[in-house]
């Protein structure tokens, strides 16, 4: 049961297909962290009904684990930008990814990628910062959450231990220095697309 209550366990056990897992993540409102940085555990995400990328990633990983699949995370790191965590899964020998994000980009990936580098590169074009620079630079080896005590990320108060370990896991470069220098900023039409959000930011009081 991983320390979950029967109700919590049943909620995640029902997520037994990729579509169900991603739909569940999309239905959770965005965590805008009004009181400071968080890495909520699976239990806290279910209780508080809010999540950002790594929080959604651990929920998806837990659902996979309960349904007999390995709970694997990948860390995507960026320069002058935020990192992003995704949950890996395989179908028919190909990789796909679950992703919790509020924007139109950096979302779910169908299981059609032959290698993890291929999958990571599928996020490259749309991964950008507020200056419209393409910022994705590295991706990590799969991190198996079975390496971490479930008390620290499934049923505890937070999952900071996962965040630390994934960030320290071996990473691979996606670009050469020459390629980095040749990058151009995103055109206006792509900038407009990035303004679309699933959940609007709350107004500041």
Image (tube, rainbow, N blue to C red):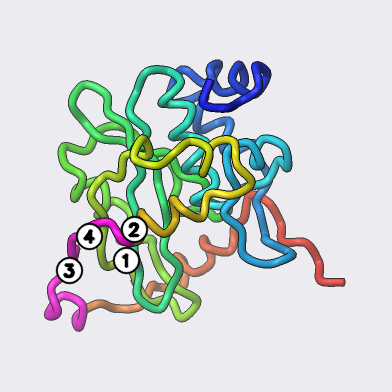
Q: Which mark is residue 171?
A: 4
Q: Are marks 2 and 1 in contact (CB under 8 Å)?
A: yes
- Toward which corner of the image does residue 70 lie, by quadrant? top left
User: In the orientation shown, which residue stands out farthest toward the right?
Assistant: 205
C-beta proximity under 8 Å, tags 2 and 4: no
| Precedes in sequence: disc 3 or disc 1 | 1
Residue 59, given in percent of the width and then of the height, sits at: 52, 36
Image position of 20 (left or right of 168): right
Do the CB atoms of the residues marked 4 and 1 lie less than 8 Å apart?
A: no
SS class, disc 3: loop
In which quadrant is the C terminus drawn?
bottom right
**Crowd rating for badge 4 (residues with CA inside 10 Å; few <14, some 14–19, many 20+):** some
Measure how far apart labels 3 and 4 are at the Cα level. Answer: 12 Å
For the residue labelled by badge 4, is the local secondary structure a helix, a strand or a loop?
Answer: strand
Which residue is depicted at the point 28% across and 51% down? 122
Q: Label 3: how many residues lie within 10 Å, few (<14), some (14-19) or many (20+)?
A: few
Q: Residue 188: which numbered mark, if any?
A: none
Circle 1 residue: 136
**Spatial CA span between label 2 and label 1:** 7 Å
- The span picked out in magenta is 168-182
Query: Residue 175's mark?
Result: 3
The tag earlier along the polypeptide, 2 or 1, is: 2
């Amino acid at each position: 049961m991983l320390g979950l209550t029967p109700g919590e366990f049943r909620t995640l056990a029902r997520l037994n297909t990729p579509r169900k897992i991603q739909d569940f993540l999309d239905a959770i409102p965005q965590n805008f962290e009004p009181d400071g940085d968080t890495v909520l555990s699976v239990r806290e995400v279910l209780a508080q009904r809010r999540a950002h990328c790594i929080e959604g990633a651990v929920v998806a990983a837990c659902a996979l684990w309960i349904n007999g699949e390995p709970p694997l995370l990948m860390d995507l790191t960026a320069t002058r930008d935020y990192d992003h965590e995704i949950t890996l899964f395989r179908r028919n020998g190909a990789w796909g990814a679950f992703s919790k994000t509020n924007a139109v980009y950096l979302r779910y990936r169908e299981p059609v990628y032959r290698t993890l580098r291929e999958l990571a590169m599928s996020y490259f074009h749309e991964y950008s910062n507020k200056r419209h620079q393409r910022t994705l630079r590295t991706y990590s080896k799969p991190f198996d959450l079975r390496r971490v005590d479930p008390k620290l990320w499934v049923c505890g108060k937070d999952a900071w231990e996962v965040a630390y370990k994934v960030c320290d896991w071996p990473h691979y470069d996606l670009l050469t220095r020459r390629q980095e220098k040749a990058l151009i900023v995103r055109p206006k039409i792509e900038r407009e697309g990035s303004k679309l959000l699933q959940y609007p930011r709350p107004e500041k009081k």
